[in-house]
Image: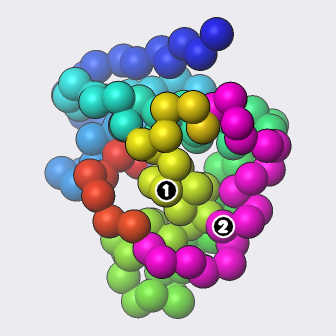
Amino acid sequence: MHVVKIFLNKYIPFGKRYLAINLFGVVFAKGKLNRATVNHEYIHTLQQREMAFLFFFLWYILEWIFRVIQYRSFHKGYYNISFEREAYRNQNNLHYKQERKRYSWVKYLKKGKSSRQSVPR
Ligand SMILES: [Zn+2]
């Protein structure tokens, strides 16, 4: 079963650009999320679980810093974190959770075309 716990609130995530953030498998959202976004966040839950949560956040921050330098943009850097590349590219495939193999995000370390859609985190 795939249950996504969502806490609607006014403040988290910080910043106008972001609608949702997944912290330790719990999604904080500032508004109602569509199915693709819920799917996107669930993909992050799978990534976090296989990385024992802590390593996910460590890697996420380190890769974000690296991508920001690479793309010279905070926002573009964020979109190109391998966890985000995997989540954005597969968020519209509602069967992805079942099909996905563990550590699939590793494939997204290599550059592919970047995807720019709505902005969940
Ligand atoms: Zn995301």
Q: Are marks 2 and 1 in contact (CB under 8 Å)?
A: yes
Q: Measuring 42% from the left and 42% from the top, which residue is drawn there?
A: 92
Dot 1 corresponds to which residue? Answer: 89
Region in magenta: 97-114
- The kind of residue tagged 1 is Arg
Find the distance from the CA under tag 2 to the CA under tag 1.
10 Å
* SS class, disc 2: helix
80 relative position to 9: left or right: right
Q: Is mark 2 within 8 Å of ligand 1?
A: no
Question: Which numbered disc flags the more N-terminal residue, 2 or 1?
Answer: 1
Q: Closer to the camera, 49 or 38?
A: 38
Q: Where residue 108 is drawn, which disc sits there?
A: 2
- Quarter of the rendering occupied by the N terminus: top right
Q: Where residue 34 is drawn, which disc sits there?
A: none
Could you say which quadrant of the image residue 81 lies in?
Answer: bottom right
Image height of 32 relative to 118, above or below: above
